[in-house]
Amino acid sequence: MRKPPIDPTLPGPKLGRVGLLFVQFMVLIMFAALVGRLWYLQVPMADHYRELAVANHHQQLVVPATRGQILDSAGRPLVNNRTELVVSADYHELQAMEDGGEKVLTDLAEVLDVPVKELQQRVRLCSPEVERPCWPGSPYQPVTLAEGIEGAVALQIMESAEDFPGITAQAQAVREYPQGEHAGQMLGYLQPVTQEELDAREELRTRFTGIDQVGRDGLEAIYDQELRGTAGLRTLGVNNHGEVMDVISDELPVAGRHIVTHMDVEVQKAAEKALAEGMAGARPKYRADSGAAVVLDVTNGGVVAMASLPTYDPSIWQGGIDQETFDEILSEEAGEPLLSRAVQGTYPPGSTFKVSSMSAAAENGYSLHDSYACPGSVNLAGQSYENYAGAGQGSISLKQAIVKSCNTVFYNFGYQMWQQDGGLHPDGEPKEAMAEMARGYGFGSPTGVDLPYETGGRVPDREWKRTFWEETREANCARADEGYPDIAETNPSHASYLQRLAHEHCVQGFEWRANEAVNFSIGQGDVLVSPLQLASAYAAIANGGTLYEPRVAKALVAADGSDVEPIEPTVKGELPVSEETLRYLQDALTEVTKTGTGGGAFGDFPQDKVSVAGKTGSADAEQRQVSSWFASYAPADDPQYAVAVLVSQGGTGGETAAPIASEIYKAIYGLGDGEELLPGGEPHSDLPAVRSDGSIDPLEP
């Protein structure tokens, strides 16, 4: 049977009407939300999205700043810049290629006329397992493949960019060292920024150019931020094809500041020449394997010259250093030329240290006006100690003990002051007068010079001895049991001696013994100083007791000369000695170069024109020849310069180091064949002028 039709006028189910109303309500809600969202995007967020839209058509370009120069005190360039055409590679783009960039590098090698293997080596990232040449910088930097290329070659690469993906050729400023190897360790060098440096140094990340380099040593490292300047930022307007349509803004780079140093390049050359000739003259009698000479301005701590041999030319780092050269500058066979003996080398100072020991005695009860026995040898705590060559001089003054360098007088001082402290077993807190005076002279801590990696040397005392024993006890005890079988095969007696010594150190190595105090008094044993520390100490004696922190940099000057920031002298401390003791010591040092141990070296020196005060030193070390020292200042009556010279394994101080110092003074004051290197024998008081166009007007000689 057919169902009757539904009457549309009859009301539908109640549930259907509610659903319809609900749907209509939801449509209204969604429409309102859409309107609200459109309003939010178009009104409150309009500026934000307008900026994003504009940014999509902007390209920011970081413009490198020109690095500041390093100048000597007269304005002569020690480090400057030159522009070279450089070919670089995008490391990640090459790595993303199916062949790792092999074809691109092969094609590039033909254009550059270099072996493809060389380019492949340069694009590798450096690591302990990868030999140089390799890339020492961040993989996000352009990797330098070739420097100093011809303009035609660069043009060929740029015009055929599609054939060399990931490769760029552009002009780049590189460091130039017009003085060659002179002062190489003091100046330092540059290397590409590593990823670790980018992560650690915010100023590098702020406007990283991709070709940035940082100072790795010397002044380049210490004043890296001042020298590098501030990179510029150029904002370009581009279309959707990447074509530049306009320059939106252009924030110019600010060139780095120049460093004017206290150093005089001619004095530096004279110091290096005198040192090299003195070392050569000491051979073949002595090994004379390395040396240093430091010249300080005693009035402010300025470093006028700092020679260290062997040395090297910092330009070897340009364009990447090969493994052979890298190994050589670090090798003992080549004398480790990367190491500055003046700042990083430490050695027993020998008799040059007696200025500290005499001061300790004078300030702790020993009269400057008494006489003291100077026998050929003394027996202390069951051990015999001799003068140099076993010569005795009878009863002498403290002045003559310095002038003639009588060891036995100082042996007695060291032993008696050790006894006064309680010997092996002090009762209460020992005074450690010798060690405390040495620290007052600046020994045992860094001088504070504005150069990296400075060593502090060592002032041994009871506390140091116990700390050293705790650090080495386990190894000494093991050697006491096992001996030295490797040495016993060729030298059984020496191996037996070393085993007995190891046993002694294992059991009683914490004791500060009489022999250690005795040797310390004449600058032998465990005391270590650097040539720079010794020069600073003698500069303080010369100027009346002020111990300055040495400074290489004298001023920072804006690239256009608009701003000059002098670097003021910094006082580290005052010598803990009375005026009477200081005057007495000055008189004694003045006599050393006339009638004392330095008289032979200064026999032909015109002391009537420039009087030199100083002290010779000869230092012994186990299984090494004696090292030669001379520490001094001049003129003795109106001091201006302090000169300290060391020749490692160079013989006695009077025969090697003192003549080197004599030649340096002759060069400074024009007392030899040449003219005086510094006008009137004084450092330059004025700064060289930097003109607004960036050119430099050196001071007249």
Image (spheres, helix red, strand yellow):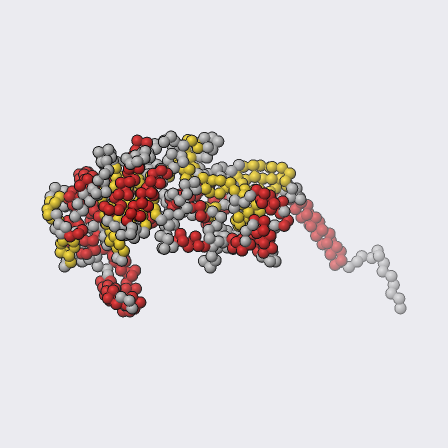
Q: Is residue 508 visible?
A: yes
Where the N terminus falls, by quadrant? bottom right
429 horizontally vs 683: left or right: left
Quadrant of the rendered image containing residue 7 = bottom right
Quadrant of the rendered image containing residue 78 = top left
Q: Position of residue 224 (x, y in %)?
A: 43, 43
Q: Residue at x 45, y 48 (%)?
A: 317
For residue 252, above or below residue 89:
above
Q: Position of residue 2 (x, y in %)?
A: 89, 66
Where the C terminus falls, by quadrant? top left
How many circles with numbers are drawn on the protein?
0
Q: Position of residue 75 (x, y in %)?
A: 40, 34
Q: Position of residue 201 (x, y in %)?
A: 46, 47
Q: Residue at x 23, y 65 (%)?
A: 497
The furthest residue to the right: 1
Q: Residue at x 19, y 40 (%)?
A: 594
For residue 11, above or below residue 440:
below
Comparing 559 with 391, the one in front is 391
Q: Is residue 196 visible?
A: no
Q: Residue at x 27, y 66 (%)?
A: 491
